Image (tube, rainbow, N blue to C red):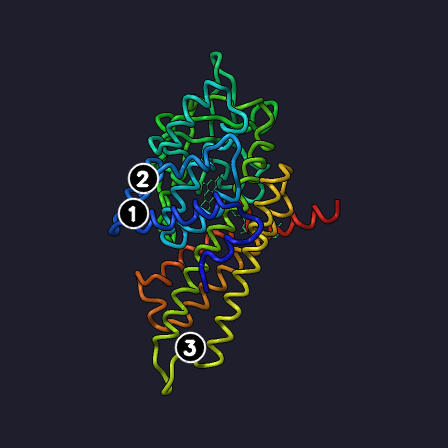
Amino acid sequence: MDRFEHYGWPFFEERHRQLAAEADGWIQKKLIEEEDADSICRYFVRELGKAGFLKHCVSATPDVRSIALLREVLAYHHGLADFAFVMQGLGSGPIVLAGTEAQKKAYLPRVAQGETIAAFALSEPEAGSDVAAMTCTATQKGGGWVVNGVKTWISNGGIADFYVTFAKAEAGISAFIVDAKEVDASERIDIIAPHPMATVKFKDSKAELIGEAGHGFKLAMRNLDVFRTTVAGAALGFARRALAESLARAKNRKMFGARLADLQMTQAKLADMATGIEAAALLTYRSAWVKDTKQTRVTREAAMAKMHATEMAQEVVDGAVQIFGGLGVKSGHPVERLYREVRALRIYEGATEVQKVIIARELLK
Ligand SMILES: Cc1cc2nc3c(=O)[nH]c(=O)nc-3n(C[C@H](O)[C@H](O)[C@H](O)COP(=O)(O)OP(=O)(O)OC[C@H]3O[C@@H](n4cnc5c(N)ncnc54)[C@H](O)[C@@H]3O)c2cc1C
């Protein structure tokens, strides 16, 4: 099966096909020997910036198809390449959407060139799925703002240069830019697939308001309206890699006087994996295409794509581990890495249950 076959779908234009092919060739030359996750991320941010790919996720008119397909291609080859790419977009999105000209000028070019690392700080220890329960506060002090409180699960926490942070002001949840020098991000969090991540503490941290006070929740949701569909793109990349690894293994592994691929139960597994991937790809690029071409909110489409693609990817990767047998759980093996990488996708940017609530709410409107 041609991994790029779906780029021939009517959702895409020639520029998308060229971008996917360019990114696929590029990333294969940029894969490096294992280092710690912080160094790998810094490396990918720099290289993605130099190569011009970050411009796609730090754009005044984001093209969701380009971001989703870049995530698909990068995730296929390296989970941290995808992570480094998208966090630059997620962490600067509110500035793109509502920043002043001065803020845009100060932050966006450097983020797009990979010279500055961005982070998006919304979640708190007691406010994950229930965003409105946040307790971080923002108050006006000496003509500016200060933020107090604790954020957690913050991707790029510890290596970011600035944190786009959400906190409650008198007018309601508001978005701010907080310089890394103003926070304590020393409490790092280890997760099953190593990523730079930290709990971030704010103590009278100087902050710059983004947009209007009280508009932060809307801003966070508008940002997610762009990036949620792209999580599905990353899920597709992991799933396609798992299928490619599975096909190669099934064709080569000899057992019972035949190949693993000759056994019908294996064939059924492979057929289910491929069908799941294609169905999720349709939902993903449908959502991206609607956003790009109609310029409307895609709350329902993005929730369906994110939910279905991440659940599918988990199943496909699990199927790949099964096909590989013992090798599938050997530390460092590609499918073992995929197994660890894929798990968080069903949790962040709204867990599957949250997506179900969103879809049902849209249906019942
Ligand atoms: C790898 C990773 C990276 C992350 N990066 C960031 C980041 O950069 N910035 C940031 O702000 N946050 C980030 N997060 C946090 C992420 O957004 C939260 O983990 C997520 O929103 C869930 O919040 P929680 O962990 O507090 O779980 P909880 O809110 O406690 O939810 C636990 C579980 O409850 C279930 N649930 C939720 N709603 C319902 C419902 N209505 N009905 C029934 N069950 C429900 C779901 O299964 C959910 O997983 C990241 C998380 C991970 C794992």
Ligand 1 is within 8 Å of the C-beta of the residue at disc 3: no
- Tell whether label 1 touches label 2 (CB within 8 Å): yes
Image location (x, y in percent) of residue 24:
38, 50
State the residue in front, 9 or 141: 9
Sequence-earlier tag: 3 or 2:
2
Q: Residue at x 39, y 74 (%)?
A: 250
**Which three-letter amino acid code belongs to the residue tagged 1?**
Lys
State the residue in front, 146 or 36: 36
Mark sitting on residue 298: none
Q: Single out the residue that lies furthest toward the bottom.
A: 257
The C terminus: image quadrant: top right
Is 13 positioned to the left or the right of 38 in the image?
A: right
Q: Residue at x 28, y 42 (%)?
A: 39
Image location (x, y in percent) of residue 222:
58, 35
- Tell whether label 1 touches label 3 (CB within 8 Å): no
Mark 2: few/some/many CA within 10 Å (<14, 14-19, 20+): many
State the residue in front, 190 or 340: 340
Image location (x, y in percent) of residue 3:
44, 59
**Which three-letter amino acid code belongs to the residue tagged 2?**
Glu
Write down the quadrant of residue 173 in the picture: top right
Image location (x, y in percent) of residue 88:
42, 36
Residue under numbered circle 2: 47
Sequence-earlier tag: 2 or 1:
1
Residue under numbered circle 3: 261
**Which three-letter amino acid code belongs to the residue tagged 3?**
Ala
Sequence-earlier tag: 3 or 1:
1
Residue under numbered circle 1: 30
Q: Single out the residue that lies furthest toward the front.
A: 14
User: Under tag 3, what secondary structure?
Assistant: helix
Q: Tell me the distance, in whole angstroms, between the alpha carbons under discs 3 and 2.
A: 39 Å
State the residue in front, 59 or 117: 59
Q: Tell me the distance, in whole angstroms, between the alpha carbons under discs 2 and 1.
A: 8 Å
